[in-house]
Amino acid sequence: MTLVREGGEKGDGGEERRETTVEAEPGESVVEAAAQADEHVPFGCLTGACGTCTAELLDGEVRYRRPPRALKARHIESGYVLACVAVPETDCRLRVGASVQAELVENPWK
Amino acid sequence: MSDAENPDDAHAGHDHTGHDHEGPGYATPQAAIEESEPEELAYVMCLYVGTDVEAPDFLGVVDLDPDSDTYAEVVNRVEMPNMGDELHHFGWNACSSSCHVGGLERRHLVIPGQRSSRLHVVDTKDRQNPEITQVIEPEEVFEYDLSAPHTVHCIPDGQILISMLGDADGELPGGFLQLDESDFSISGRWDPPGEIEMNYDYWYQPRRNVMISSEWAAPQTYYPGFDLDDVEAGKYGRQLHVWDWEAGTVEQTLDLGEEGMIPLEVRFLHSPDHAHGYVGAALSSNVFHFQETERGPGERVGHFEAEKVIDIEPREHEDWDMPVPGLVTDLLVSMDDRYLFFSNWLHGDVRMYDISDPSNPRLADQLWAGGNFGPSHPIEGEREVIAGPQMLQLSLDGERLYWTTSLFSSWDNQFYPEEAEQGSVMLKADVDPRRGTMELDQDFLVDFGEMPHGPARAHEIRWPDGDCTSDVWQ
């Protein structure tokens, strides 16, 4: 699977993207496979309840070990997945990092 | 690893006529004021959850000795063994509630991971260099169908009680987990399942045989962040639960209504005889006073009523579509039961109320730092302060009020995204409890933005010898 991270600004003002490819063993979650490869993906509860590990699935398919309770229907429709309980079924590209979780909920009054 | 050499000596009666009590803490709240020395260091929960910093959360040791060369600096960090815990609240193995238990010491901190459901036991025998001595892994906690540990209080009989906000899946109901102080093993579930649905903070007042617990939401609701749809769907709490303390059962539930949305911290007055207390309704930005109003003959628990006593008006802000609510996220009562302090995290002020007439609080003073309306540089020449005052802690003598600025990683990211990039601060006000005034200490700012692994958030604060939110008297 490929992990895509955003961060930093390129010289032309655009956002920089860094991609790393990681081998996932069958049955491993995205968080586990990333950890095996010393690639950090943020996580919290590891049970699908908290959303700290939220990623955007850009390509490929995942199955869930446990229901992704932290995601609302609108998040799932928009392509967000929970990396702690998502197991890649095909070669996947995922956008990861703390900023992805922060996209799910905005300040509702601002 | 027991902190009690002679646990059988417990409960020798409650006679304070002699000067000494053998156990930890202080004989009375007034004894805590008289006997305590000014705090020389603070333990602070520090965290990296909700950022890209690849490091575990840590217990920060902050130097509070004004004569020290490292005053107002983080002088030690005790890193947790895992990442992703979200350290939040924590508590002691023993406090003044065990003041007659000979041999027992206030020595071990129980530090839960709010997201991980992992429980850490930290030995503070060497105050400057605490050590993790034991870890209860999440799987052991989930066996009791509980998760999301929050408030830790030691309770009589060598037990430790932890409020748990969800079941093993992060759904409802929550409950309470009990640890055995002698070896920090899980004793079991304290409450019969089904007494409550939502849970958050609690405080017990044993002489009235009462405990009051509050409500946040299911972990799966509040963990990812604050969503107004969840409020409209009734997924956030607005009730207080009045428990029979000895029986561990709910005897009365108080609905605080629309004005009492998300009641968080619960604080009884410290005097063990008092049946008054306060709770801050965070979302509604109100403070409620609760009290025992009657108790029939033979009744184990009195009848309680709660009434809104402080209403924080939302304020217009040019960058906001809606007036900004204050968001009362923490409150505490001074050890002499004279003042109530609370924070308006979104506005950016901390307030001090005279509560000598408990049901009619009177605003004594107010101080602004950070937030949406306070100065972003409350101390000239020092770093920017992003979020408003949040977790409070007060010296036992009532003369120094400290606070940190992080609420909860995902909620910080919504309301103060810069808190993750710049880290939290800890600030201090000098309090004059005779004049009822506060003044920001211009020489005190702890910068959690300058940590070795990167900027950290900072949450609950405690002193090694007990503080204004740790101890209960029997």
Image (tube, helix red, strand yellow):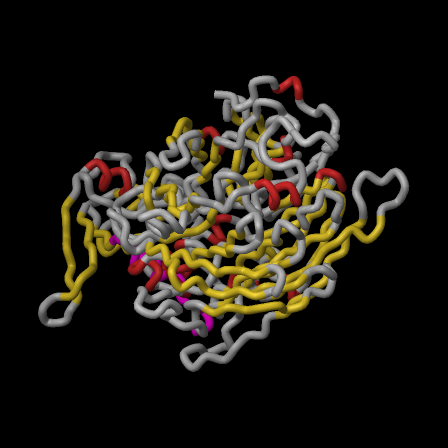
Residue at 54%, 22% in the rendered image = B182
Query: For the magenta stretch, what is the residue range?
Result: A96-110
Residue B456: where, in percent of width, then height?
33, 52
Furthest-front residue in view? B67
Count the marks: how many?
0
- In the image, A87 versus B70, the foreground residue is B70
Residue at 43%, 82% in the rendered image = B318
In the rendered structure, does residue B201 fall within the stretch colored magenta?
A: no
- In the image, A29 versus B474, the foreground residue is B474
- In the image, B346 versus B166, the foreground residue is B346
Residue B322: where, in percent of width, then height?
49, 77
Question: Residue B200, can we see it?
Answer: no
Q: Is residue B161 above or below residue B201?
A: above
Residue at 9%, 68% in the rendered image = A11
Lateral position of residue B192 relative to residue B291, left or right:
left
The C terminus of chain B is located in which quarter?
Answer: top right
Lateral position of residue A24 relative to residue B76, left or right:
left
Residue at 61%, 44% in the rendered image = B34
Question: Residue B206, can we see it?
Answer: yes
Furthest-right residue in view? B297
Lateral position of residue B175 relative to residue B40, left or right:
right
In the rendered structure, does residue A103 fall within the stretch colored magenta?
A: yes
Q: Is residue B318 above or below residue B216?
A: below
